[in-house]
Image: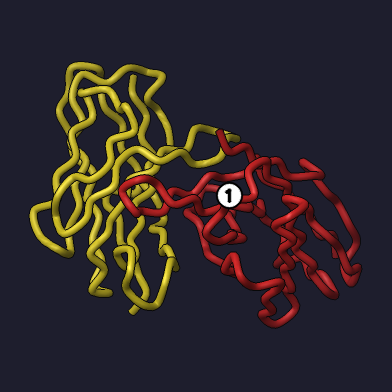
Chain colours: A red, B yellow
Amino acid sequence: KQEVTQIPAALSVPEGENLVLNCSFTDSAIYNLQWFRQDPGKGLTSLLLIQSSQREQTSGRLNASLDKSSGRSTLYIAASQPGDSATYLCAVGATMNTGFQKLVFGTGTRLLVSP
Amino acid sequence: DTEVTQTPKHLVMGMTNKKSLKCEQHMGHRAMYWYKQKAKKPPELMFVYSYEKLSINESVPSRFSPECPNSSLLNLHLHALQPEDSALYLCASSQVPGHLPRNTIYFGEGSWLTVV
């Protein structure tokens, strides 16, 4: 059974710092890996999607890497801003026997960026 | 338009009530999903619909009854729920397997359900 863990569970940093969020998964047979952002009381916003054949993806100040063999992904946030404060969820996509993709989510990292 | 729209945003219902959650997308996606997220927990898959047919039921109790009346709409009918069913219910959509673009899943804002 796929298990996804995120470290740290919570992180508090001053504005402007570069930071790294970690995600690890137990089964390397994944289809892809996605990073989501969730603001309090809100749904999920997809940030980056890395296919299993890719090593990294970048979008603006965000960079996500994937190392399937070691079961790890990192989300790097450059020059953090108070607006980055949210919970960040890592989700691995596993193909089910029906061909559909099931997302297995990590436990999340709650990020607080102080002005 | 990359939106998945869910209504209502908040719902309070008694244990004997019957209510429904609604989800709509106009991205031409033929796969639609219901996820459940308890407070401070990650989302968990409940149901998957493909081409308006139920493809996956993750052992969800029968008091939750999904319905896909057409390719744009997904409903979740609720009956005789328990207080422990209180959670955020998230709808999502994507292309079906084998279609491009691959795998991008779009989530709605969710419906907050409180069972009293």
Q: Position of residue B13 (x, y in %)?
A: 26, 27
Residue visible at 72% across and 68% down in the picture: A64
User: In which quarter of the view is residue B106 placed?
Assistant: bottom left
A25 lies left or right of B3: right
Of residue B37 and residue A74, the one placed in the foreground of this image is A74
Q: Quadrant of the N terminus of chain B?
A: bottom left
A26 lies left or right of B87: right
Residue labelled with disc 1: A40
Q: Position of residue A86 (x, y in %)?
A: 67, 55
Q: With respect to residue A108, does B82 lie above or below?
A: above
Please name the amino acid that badge 1 sits on: Pro
Count neighbours of disc 1 (C-alpha within 10 A) and say few if under 14, some if 14 to 19, many if 20 or more.
few
Residue visible at 91% across and 68% down in the picture: A17
Q: Chain of mark 1?
A: A
Q: With respect to residue B91, does B29 lie above or below?
A: below
Residue visible at 74% across and 73% down in the picture: A63
Q: With respect to residue B36, does B51 lie above or below?
A: below
Q: With respect to residue B14, does B56 lie above or below?
A: below
Report the residue that reaches farthest toward the left. B69
User: In which quarter of the view is residue A2 placed?
Assistant: top right
B12 lies left or right of A36: left
A82 lies left or right of B75: right
Q: Position of residue B64 (x, y in %)?
A: 23, 30
